């Protein structure tokens, strides 16, 4: 359970740091690139300190790890990119709801493929967590929103969901000894693509030094969020891990955004906080 708690705190930290970068008007693409630089450096350091270079070779395990890492890295960046596009076209609330509800993909596939079934009281907790996600990301009453662009929202749901499912698939593959190597491949793949996108951009970078520093700060929780999430999936069923991870992240982001950034909490936010708290308690019973 401690692994799931750490992964959740790391996930919330990522969102809060990105929120900070947006508030300060930092260069988002530069933040993204340096986030992957730091995550790749730390995962590379883990390979050395855990002496994982010794297990590398021209064998099936090494090639499977590289394959998992490249595909996951591409999906990580795709999900982040389509999420940014969706925020511009559909707004943050609707985009956030579809991104968080993407946990239905790994949760459902884990139940179908590996029979990871929750107890009835845990199932009620999962339903409360999903309800809280929908409530927390709904538009406040009285807001006027344009008609959503459905294909982009579906892309957010699928890309994010399958990116998380690949973490579960890696955990089930019997390659856990290769975890630092897998994460290094994930982040070096995302780094190469995001760096290529940054180089192709014509506009000059905004606040480059501060953007790079904040990006490096994002990279630390970004790496350990995935690192400890895989550990949590090894010890707990995915049908519990993913709802708790997502709902817990929302709870922390909502509360800490109110404390740090003085964001107003509406009635629906308090309802979501209550539903999340109850759901998390029931999932752990």
Image (cartoon, grey):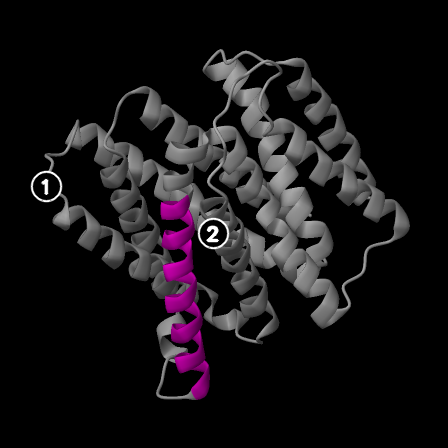
The crowd level at tag 1 (other Cα within 10 Å; few <14, some 14-19, many 20+) is few
Residue at left 60%, top 27%? 138
Q: What residue occupies the far right of the structure in this picture? A: 120
Q: Tell me the residue that label 1 is attached to.
A: 202
Q: Which portion, as a residue range, is magenta?
A: 60-82
Distance from label 2 to label 1 (Cα)?
27 Å
- Residue contact at pointers 2 and 1, CB within 8 angstroms: no
- Residue 222, x across and y down, in percent: 42, 45
Residue at left 67%, top 51%? 241
Nearest the eye: 260 or 242: 242
Quarter of the picture holding the C terminus: top right
- Residue 191, x across and y down, in percent: 27, 54
Residue at left 89%, top 50%? 120
Q: Relative to 17, does residue 110 appear above or below in the rendering?
A: below
Which is nearer the N-term, disc 2 or disc 1?
2
Horizontal side of residue 187 vs 130, given as left or right = left
């Amino acid at each position: 359970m401690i692994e799931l708690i750490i992964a959740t705190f790391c996930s919330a930290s990522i969102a809060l740091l990105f929120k900070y970068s947006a508030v300060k008007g930092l260069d988002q693409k530069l933040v993204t690139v340096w986030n992957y630089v730091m995550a790749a450096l730390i995962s590379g350091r883990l390979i050395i300190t855990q002496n994982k270079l010794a297990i590398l070779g021209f064998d099936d395990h090494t090639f499977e790890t590289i394959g998992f890492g490249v595909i996951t890295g591409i999906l990580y960046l795709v999900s982040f990119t389509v999420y940014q596009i969706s925020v511009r076209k559909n707004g943050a609330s609707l985009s956030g709801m579809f991104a968080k509800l993407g946990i239905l993909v790994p949760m459902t596939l884990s139940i179908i493929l590996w029979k990871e079934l929750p107890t009835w009281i845990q199932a009620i907790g999962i339903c409360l967590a999903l309800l809280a996600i929908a409530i927390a990301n709904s538009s406040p009453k009285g807001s006027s929103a344009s008609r959503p662009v459905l294909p982009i929202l579906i892309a957010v749901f699928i890309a994010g969901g399958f990116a998380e499912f690949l973490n579960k698939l890696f955990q089930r593959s019997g390659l856990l000894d290769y975890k630092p190597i897998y994460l290094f491949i994930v982040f070096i793949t995302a780094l190469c693509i995001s760096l290529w996108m940054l180089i192709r951009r014509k506009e000059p970078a905004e606040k480059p030094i501060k953007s790079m520093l904040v990006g490096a700060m994002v990279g630390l929780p970004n790496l350990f969020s995935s690192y400890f999430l895989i550990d949590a999936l090894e010890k707990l069923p995915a049908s519990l891990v993913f709802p708790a991870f997502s709902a817990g992240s929302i709870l922390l982001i909502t509360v800490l955004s109110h404390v740090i950034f003085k964001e107003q909490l509406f009635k629906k936010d308090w309802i979501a906080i209550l539903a999340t708290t109850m759901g998390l308690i029931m999932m752990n019973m």
